[in-house]
Image: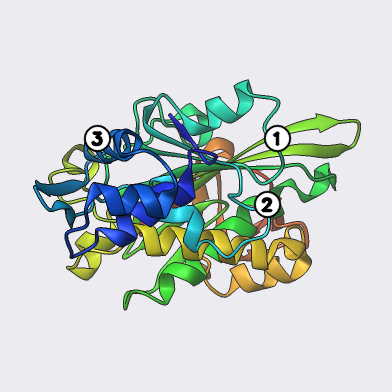
Amino acid sequence: MIKGDFNIESYKKILELIDKKTVSGEFLAKELNISRVAVWKKIKKLEKLGYKIERSKQGYKLISKPDKLLPFEIIPYLKTKELGRNYIYFEKINSTNIYVKDNKELEDGSVVVAEFQDSGKGRKGRRWVSPAYKGLYFSILLKRNIPITDILKLSLFFSFVIKNVLQKHISNEIFIKWPNDLYINNKKFGGILIETEIEGNEINRIIVGIGININATYEDLEPISDIATSLYIEEGKSFNRKELFINILEEIERNISNLSSSEIVKSVEDCLLWKDYKIKVLDEDLEGILIGLSETGALLLKTEGGIKTVYSGDLSIRKS
């Protein structure tokens, strides 16, 4: 685990100084106001984290960076005031949501990110496949007091914000499968899991778990490739995970005032998967035409018995 207070500036400065040129340990020591032994230890730490550094009598030269979401690759470039300022990084963890739930002392806006989760989960406890170093798997903690009736809007808000960020980088159209999944070409590539703590009639602690398949290949998703995909598979190219991650966090903070706004519901309706199609709500054995969303974000179905409001359930398209 690496926390955001991990001497970020000193590591960032070393990486900048040795980028594409050889710099002596003595020069680095003077620039950072530390000993040459301390410089050597920091170089060793960077190498352990995956940075390829060429050593010579003249000093150190950065050859390549690992594709990792390390604090000093994210925080210095993140233009947020609160979101992600407390940044906790794991190479591997059971689940970022579980970590946030277990650590009650975490502050508002904390972000916990992992390169791999071996117990990542989606709705109803389903396992989330997370190929290492190929996606974005993270949790956000928000301490907000909002009415319980707005709980569906939370999933819609995060789905819509992430959809908007990613849409700028790809040609395929992204759709939102109610209430919290991201789809391209009728295959899922991202999902949001909202977990809340409730006091009285209000939600006061929100844990937002987000999983997005970015650079996963067919082989990575082979067991579920009939229903799952990634940006790489659909677009035929790799993406800069760091750039997308920073963009997503910044866009979330920029729009956080709309967290439970009715405007979000209207916006999601325009990109709702299977809108105007006949669908089944598996949990309720209900069929109807998906006509839109209610003011609270619930699903509206036109059935033979009239308009039905659905607050939860798994959807599937009704095949003729």
Q: Does label 3 or label 2 sit earlier along the sequence?
A: 3
Residue situated furthest top in the rendering = 102
Measure how far apart labels 3 and 1 are at the Cα level: 41 Å
Which of the marked residues, 1 or 2, is nearer the chain's N terminus? 2
Measured from the top left, where is residue 215 in percent x and y?
Answer: 24, 55
Label 1 environment density (alpha carbons within 10 Å; few <14, some 14–19, many ≥20)? some
**Residue for badge 3:** 44
Looking at the rendering, in which quadrant would you find the C terminus?
Answer: bottom left
Vertical arrangement, residue 309 with respect to residue 173, above or below = above
Residue displayed at 33% across by 61% down: 16
Rounded to the nearest angstrom, the CA distance separating label 1 from label 2 is: 10 Å
Q: Which residue is mark 2?
A: 154
- In the rendered structure, the answer to whether residue 15 lies left or right of residue 317 reads left
In the rendered structure, which amino acid carries the disc numbered 1? Thr
Instruction: Provide the secondary structure element on which disc 2 rests.
Output: helix
Q: Label 3 sits on what residue type?
A: Lys
Q: Label 2 near label 1: C-beta < 8 Å?
A: yes
- Image point 53% across, 41% down: which residue? 4
